[in-house]
Amino acid sequence: MAIIQVTLFLALADSRPFFDEGVYLTGSWLFSKGVLPYLDFFESKPIGIFAVGAFLFSLPPSVLIARIFMALVAVASMIIIFFIAKKAFNEKAGFIAAGFFAFASIFFGDFWFVIEPFVSLFALFSVFCYLNFLEKPKMKWLAAAIFFISFAVWFKQTAILIAAMFLVFFLYNEIRRQKNISKAILLFAESFIPTIVLFALIFAFLLFSGSFSYFLEYAFGFHSQNLGYYGQIILSWKFLPVLAAIALPALLLAALLVKKINLDSRQKQLFFILILWLIGGLAMLLPLLGCCMHFIPMLPVFSLVSGFAFAEFWKKGVFLKIVSGLILFAIIFGGIFYAAYYSNAENSFNDLNSLAEKIKAASNAEDKILVLPAMPEVYFVSQRLPATKALYFGLIEYSQEFMRGEIQRLSANPPKIIVFFSSDGNFSGNGQIFVFIKQNFVEKEKIKLRAPLYGTYAFVLWFEKK
């Protein structure tokens, strides 16, 4: 299963990035060069992925390295899913759960260098450690379970809902086990020590680097100003068959549970944790634009439920065996079809790599460029620093004060080149940056892309200073 997972990921190693991946690739590369998140470039997500990426890009930075790393993250998640299902149910359930995850994760973009797979991985580590704690109630297992789910919050803020539900459940169980509230709280507090050390180190870095106030403003205040953006729900019809396939086992299992499948105490504990995980993960779906990676934190839940459900269905007669087979076929076919379809040249980095080579030839390593409106991966593939603090524009609203600062940066140190991605080949837009470009830059070239980037942008307009 690990070989299958890596093979599918490598088939997509050169596929075009998702917008979010462009942000994380570029932010990680900047961090590896000493350009600090929040202080030196705008980012509204926690520092976790940038720390991982900065370490990763101590090697020569490339998309291939990032994608190989994500393949390893996915394999680690799949292995933990296998062992959780095997521990709670049986080996057959573990194998089906692992296979379910291996193919479904491809379809939802687990191969991108984005934050959601890390949330899944650390939540899985937490569940695995807690199941071990239930078997052998040693403080190291509880401390590890608390540490991993708390660490997930440093990759995505909304993971705090999953973390909070896990922690309340862990504490409640400990109070029941100890039958002494004071003793349970004391043990729980002691188990928090590794987590407190982790948080103290991260906060110390943010404080001493001068990034802490910007971190609070961008990671929390900024999101509160853009609630309308995060409330969007646009679900592409092409994803509905796979969404149905991953939800169907859970619905069928719920129907069977009405007939009282016998669950032991450990299985009941696991199912309760998975329900909490699913409820807490709902906030991570937004904004739901098209589908994809926002479902990734929920895939381990559906995989584990499916592993157990399919093992049970196999005992219940021909009809459920047929249904199980069809669901498995849909997931396997969907994953393979996705990998085959999006690994072709039309969906590759060819256009962006050609543009990157053109930018490198027209500028020096110390020159800054500006990419508009929202293709931050161009900074990464061209290895040129952004001329603005923001890595993208147009998708969300920045404050007037922030935009004034951006115009001041552009005026004080104008970019060597501006590349503008356009759907129709025209330069259009509103706001101070567009006025600045019209006043100070002139269009030199219009480049037609072989395939529209993100299915939207068919042209690149090349601007140079007047």
Image: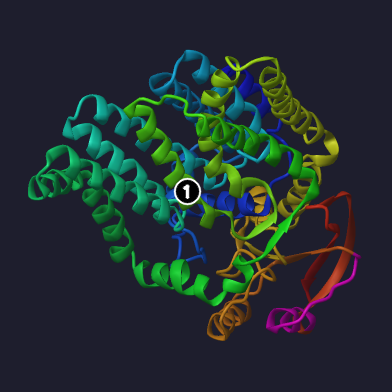
Residue under the point 85% across and 73% down: 427
Label 1 crowd bin: few (<14), some (14–19), many (20+), radius 10 Å:
many
Q: Is residue 252 above or below residue 35?
A: above
Residue under the point 15% across and 49% down: 189
Q: Is residue 292 above or below residue 426?
A: above
Residue under the point 56% across and 46% down: 114
Q: Which stretch appears magenta?
A: 424-438
Residue under the point 67% across and 48% down: 381
- In this view, the residue in front, 52 or 166, is 166
Q: Is residue 82 above or below residue 271?
A: above
Residue 433 is a magenta residue: yes
Residue type for callout 1: Ile
Q: Is residue 77 left or right of residue 373?
A: left
Image coords of residue 224 (percent x, y): 50, 74
Residue 218 is a magenta residue: no
- In this view, the residue in front, 299 or 179, is 179
Which element type, helix, strand or loop, lies under badge 1? helix
Q: Where's the C terminus, which quadrant?
A: bottom right
Q: In the figure, residue 178 lies in which quadrant? A: top left
Q: Where's the N terminus, which quadrant?
A: top right
Q: In the figure, residue 433 lies in which quadrant? A: bottom right
Q: Which residue is labeled 1 in the image? A: 49
